[in-house]
């Protein structure tokens, strides 16, 4: 379903979005706090996006491509995975292309996604951050997520063990 905000349109991710997602996932600064490093291989991004589109078709997840109203350029993505309808919970993630940081776009897009998920009957959202991802933590706090836990050495990023934090929001 397409979601609208005052400045943004969020459309379900399509295979053709991979072309615009490639430079974002190749940016080391954007990827600094992900479970894996920057992706330089375009085929890997195409496979990732295809897998996400297939997961959406199976109703296993939601992925939205974020664009500004009146501008066709993709500025970021939001994902909702680990959907558990028995317990009405899911995990959210978000990424913006770097030129679009610091303008409130992620916050605005997440408000629309949270409202949509609440409307579908979800009662709890979680988000996992790498320790040190200050922008992500600020965004989650603005969205009223609460810090719930600290996961020591949770991620193996190319041989480096990283700590993570879990944030939760009750809807
Ligand atoms: C996490 C991420 C999406 C946050 O982006 P962001 O631009 O900092 O977040 P927002 O869109 O909410 O914007 C907030 C900033 O915009 C500013 N802003 C400007 N205009 C605004 C407006 N109209 N409304 C709200 N905020 C506005 C705020 O003051 C704030 O600025 P600050 O960073 O100087 O404090 C971005 O840093 C990112 O893509 N990181 C890489 C991917 C990642 O690590 N994702 C998390 C994995 S879960």
Image (cartoon, rainbow, N blue to C red):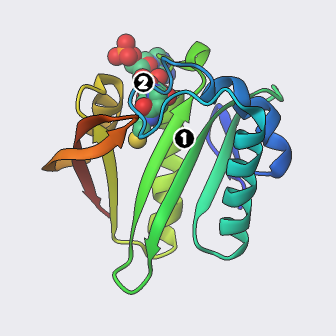
Q: Mark 1 packing: few (<14 Cα in 10 Å), some, or many (20+)?
A: many
The image shows residue 96, relative to residue 116, as above or below, that is above
Of circles 1 and 2, the one toward us is 2
- Vertical arrangement, residue 18 with respect to residue 58, above or below: above
The quarter of the image holding the C terminus is: bottom left
Q: Is mark 1 within 8 Å of ligand 1?
A: yes
Q: In the image as oriented, which residue stretches furthest toward the front? A: 159
In the image, 52: left or right of 110?
right
* Residue 53 locus on image (x, y percent): 73, 60
Ligand 1 - quadrant of the structure image: top left
Residue 109, numbered circle: 1
Q: Residue at x 48, y 58 (%)?
A: 115
- Separation of marks 1 and 2 at Cα, in angstroms: 22 Å
64 is higher (above) or lower (below) than 73: below
Q: Secondary structure at mark 1?
A: helix
Q: Position of residue 84 (x, y in %)?
A: 42, 77
- Measuring from the top left, give residue 86's x and y in whole percent: 39, 87
The reply to whether the C-beta atoms of the residues labelled 1 and 2 are less than 8 Å apart is: no
Placement of the N terminus among the 4 image quadrants: bottom right
Q: Going from the N terminus, do you reach mark 1 or mark 2 first?
A: 2
Q: Which is nearer the eye, 41 or 132? A: 41
Q: Is residue 142 left or right of residue 15?
A: left
159 horizontally vs 164: left or right: right
Locate residue 36, reporting x and y percent. 46, 37
Secondary-structure class at tag 2: loop
Which disc, if any, is residue 32? 2
């Amino acid at each position: 379903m397409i979601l609208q905000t005052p400045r943004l349109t969020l459309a379900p991710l399509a295979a053709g979005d991979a072309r615009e997602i490639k430079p974002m996932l190749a940016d080391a600064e954007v990827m600094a706090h992900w479970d894996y490093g920057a992706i330089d291989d375009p085929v890997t991004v195409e496979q990732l996006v295809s897998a996400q589109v297939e997961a959406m078709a199976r109703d296993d997840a939601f992925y939205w491509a974020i664009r500004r109203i009146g501008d066709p350029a993709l500025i970021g993505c939001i994902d909702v995975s680990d959907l558990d309808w028995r317990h009405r919970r899911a995990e959210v993630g978000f990424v913006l292309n770097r030129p679009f940081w610091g303008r409130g776009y992620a916050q605005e897009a997440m408000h629309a996604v949270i409202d949509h998920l609440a409307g579908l009957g979800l009662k709890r959202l979680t988000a996992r951050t790498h320790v040190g991802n200050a922008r992500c933590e600020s965004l989650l706090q603005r969205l009223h997520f609460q810090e719930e836990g600290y996961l020591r050495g949770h991620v193996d990023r190319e041989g480096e063990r990283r700590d993570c934090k879990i944030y939760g929001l009750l809807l």
